[in-house]
Image (cartoon, rainbow, N blue to C red):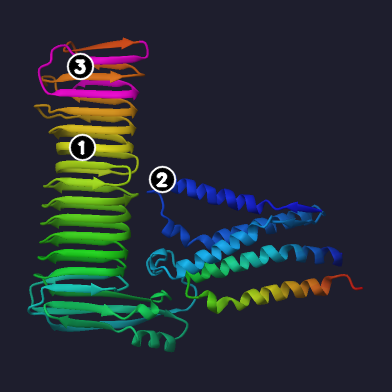
Amino acid sequence: MNDDSAALLRAIRGPVLMITLGTLFALDQFSVLSFHKTWPLLLIVAGVLNLGYWTRRKQP
Amino acid sequence: MRTRSIAGPVVLIAIGVLFLLNNLRPDFMSWDVLWRYWPFLLIGFGVVRLIEVLVDAGHGQLTVRRSGGYGWILLVIFVAFWAIARNHPHMRMSGFENGRLEIFGDEFDYPVSAKGDAAGVTMLVLDNLRGNLTVTGSDTDQFEVEGRKQVRAYNKSEADDADRNSQVKFVREGNQLIVRADQTRFSRDRRLSTDLDIKIPKGVSVEARGRSGDLTVSSINGSVDIASDRGDVRLSGIGGNAKVDVTHSNLVRATDVKGALDVEGRGADVQLENVAGQVTINGAYSGTLEFKGIDKPLHFESEQTDLRIQQIPGNFTMDLGDIRAQNIVGPLRLRTKSRDIHLADFSGPVEIDIERGDIVLAPGKLPIDKIDVHSRNGDVELTLPENARFDLKANTSQGEVHNDFGAAVKSENEGRSGSLRSVEAKGPSITISTERGAVTIRKG
C-alpha cells in the first residue's frame, strides 16, 4: 500500500510541478503577483511532494 | 514498463491548430493576445499528464510515462517566450483594460485635479498616459482636469509610494500643453491607471501618443492625431483631420468629422458617421465596420480586401461574412476573398471581384451604370428596373442561368454552363461571370 502511494506520488510530481509553474506564470501575466515574488512556491510544492514520497517509501 | 505520455502530442496538436487558425483567419485573433495565455498551455500539459497518472493508478497499473522530452522542450520555449514578452511592450497588455485577474492586492484611488490658463495653446499632447481619457472642447481659455488615479497594490504605503512617483504633470511648452505621467517605473507592473476628464479651449488640436486605455475626444475644432497601443477611440465633432493608429482596439468610432479621416491598426468594430473628408482605413478588423454618410471617397484596405467607394449617402456594413450596402454612389471597386455581398439602391459603376460568396445586386436607380462582377464560386442575382437600358453578358461555367427579366434577355444553357445575353445592346455593359454558381436576372 505504502509502496503504491509512493509510486503514485513520484508519478504525479512532474505534472504537479508543471501545473504549479503554469499557474505562477499565469498569475504573473494577469495579476499583480509577479513571478519573481511567487517562485518560492515551486520549491515548497516540490518539497511537499518529496516529503510525502520520503515518508511513504518502503523502509529498508 | 515505460509508456509515452499522450500529453506531448496533445499539446503539439493544440499548437498546430492555433498556428493554422492564425494563418487561415488572420482577422480572427492575434498573436499578441494569444501570447498572454501561454501559461495555460503549460497547465493543460500538466493536467493531461496528471489525469493519465490517476487513471493508470485507478486501473492498478501505475507506469512511469515519459513525455518523450516534449515537456522540457516546451518548458524551455515557453520560458524564452516569457522572457521576451516581458521586455516587449507590444506583447503584453497593460492589464488595466482586459481580462485582468483582480483578486490580489487592493485598489487605491487618488484624485487628480488641475486647472490653469490655456490662452495661446494650440495643441494638447497626451503623452504616454495609461487609463481612460476624455477630452472635451469648451468655450473658455482655461484648461480643467478632473480625474482619478487607480493604484493596485498590497497595502496603502506601497500605493502611496506609487502615487507619489507617478504624478500627472501639466507642462506648457510654447503653444503646446503636455499632459504627462511618469508611469514608466510602474508600467511593467500594470498597477496604475489614470482616468482623466480634460476640458480645453475648443480651438486646439489633440495629439495622443504611446498610450493605452480608452480615449474620447469631442467638440474640437482642430485636428486629432492618436497613436496608441491599445484602447477604444471615440471621436465626435472634430473640426479638422483625424488620424487614428491603434495597435489593438475593440472600437473606433468617429462621428461628425469635418476633415479627412485615417484609421490604421487592428481591432474589431469601426463605426464612421458623417465624415466630410476622405476616409482611409488600413488594417485588420474582425468585427463590424459601419459607414454612414461619407461625403468623399472611402478606401478600405486589409490583407484580403480592397474596397473603394466614391460616396456613401446611405449606409455600408461589412463584417467577416457579409457586405451590405444601401444608397451608395460609385464608382465602387471591391476585391475580397470570401463574403456574401448585397448592394441595393446604388448608382455609378460597380466592379466586384470575389473568390467565394453570393452576390445580390439591385441598383434600383436609373440610368444603370456599368457593372462588372466576377465570382469564382457563388451565385449572382441581379435585379434591374423594368425600363433599364443595358448590354448584358453573363456567363457561368458550371451552373444554371435564370431569366426572369423577359424578352429583352435571352438565356442559354449548354451542358453544365450557361449564359444570358441582351437581345439588343442599348446601354452600358453589364458583365457577370462565375465559375461555379447560378446567375439570375430579375425585373423589379
Q: Chain of mark 2?
A: B
Q: Give how far across and how far down residue B382 sits, in percent.
A: 23, 25
Marks 2 and 3 close (CB-CB < 8 Å): no
Which residues lie in the magenta part?
B415-444
Q: Residue at x 76, y 52 (%)?
A: B3
Dominant SS type (magenta): strand
Is B437 contained in the magenta span?
yes
Q: CA–CA distance between discs 1 and 3?
A: 26 Å
Above or below, B83 against B370 in this view is below
Find numbered disc 1 in the image and state the secondary structure of the residue it sits on.
strand
Q: CA–CA distance between discs 2 and 1?
A: 23 Å
Q: Earlier in the sequence, mark 1 or mark 3?
A: 1
Q: Residue at x 80, y 56 (%)?
A: B62
Q: Earlier in the sequence, mark 2 or mark 3?
A: 2
Camera-side mark, 2 or 3: 2
Q: Give how far across and how far down residue B84 sits, in percent.
A: 47, 67
Q: Chain of mark 3?
A: B
Q: Chain of mark 1?
A: B
Q: Residues within 10 Å of mark 3 (few under 14, many from 20)?
A: some
Q: Earlier in the sequence, mark 2 or mark 1?
A: 2
Residue under pointer 1: B333
Q: Which mark is residue B25?
A: 2
In the visual, does B292 lie left or right of B338?
left
Is B62 contained in the magenta span?
no
Q: Nearer the viewer, residue B334 or B40?
A: B334
Find numbered disc 3 in the image and state the secondary structure of the residue it sits on.
loop
